[in-house]
Amino acid sequence: MVNGYSSRKRGNRKEYRTLVIVCEGKKTERNYFNRYRERKSGLLILTPNSSVTDPENLVDFALSQIKKYDLDLANGDEVWCVFDADRHTDKNIKNAKELAEDKMKLCLSNPCFELWYLLHIYYFENRVSTSEVHNKLADYITNFDKVKDYFDLFLPKRDKAIQNAKRLNQKHKTTRTELLSTQSNPSTQVFQLVEYILDTIQKNKRLKL
């Protein structure tokens, strides 16, 4: 049993899917994704603690979690690596992509994870630094602190953030900018992971009806 989930199987399939989200050794991302945990959702979300911060070692760590949690990637279990672009090079990101192959998905935020928060507030296309993202958030949130839990504050505007993130992706695709690179500033693929979580939980609930 893992976090209250039974490991019993029906045939060759577990009764739940496991989603492992590996983040850059920070509290911000792990705290955010942990808020998506729901009992009896059919989706077990794990956010293992990692001290590594560079994309290549993050992928290496994620690969080790596949064996640790006995993940069945062929039957719905998934691994996602969440990291920022602001302190890394295109070579770092490319190496991580090659290491990941088809075993996991990379979730890049450029320049930083907090851009996802900012897109709940408004859409913009101008290149931005991490400090500028934090300053913009501080204009809307008194005493903004990146390690605080703002899940409930932003939840009502999550759909808006998803649409804004998709709009940025489309902009970069139009200009043929590689999303998994330092050139895709601003952009964030967090919306893809959020949509995966929401869609999986919703499908599981429908199957139980």
Image (spheres, rainbow, N blue to C red):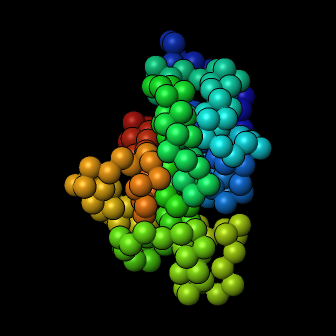
Percent position of residue 54, x then y: 65, 43
Percent position of residue 143, x then y: 69, 84
How many numbered circles does the render carry? 0
Q: Quadrant of residue 171?
A: bottom left
Left or right of 171, for residue 118: right
Q: Nearer the viewer, residue 151 or 186?
A: 186
Left or right of 188, for residue 65: right
Q: Nearer the viewer, residue 122 or 5?
A: 122
Taking the image as drawn, is residue 179 in sight?
A: yes
Give the vertical position of 45 relative to 120 (above or below).
above
Percent position of residue 181, x then y: 45, 48
Q: Residue at x 39, y 36 (%)?
A: 207
Q: Residue at x 26, y 49 (%)?
A: 176
Give the vertical position of 31 relative to 61 (above or below).
below
Q: Residue at x 38, y 72 (%)?
A: 126
Q: Quadrant of residue 172?
A: bottom left
Locate the N terminus and report the quarter of the image it occupies.
top right
Locate the C terminus and report the quarter of the image it occupies.
top left
Residue placed farthest to the left in the image?
Answer: 174
Left or right of 121, for residue 15: right
Percent position of residue 107, x then y: 50, 46
Q: Residue at x 62, y 54 (%)?
A: 87
Give the vertical position of 189 relative to 152 (above or below).
above
Q: Quadrant of residue 28?
A: bottom right
Taking the image as drawn, is residue 159 in sight?
A: no
Q: Nearer the viewer, residue 121 or 54?
A: 54
Q: Nearer the viewer, residue 48 or 208?
A: 48
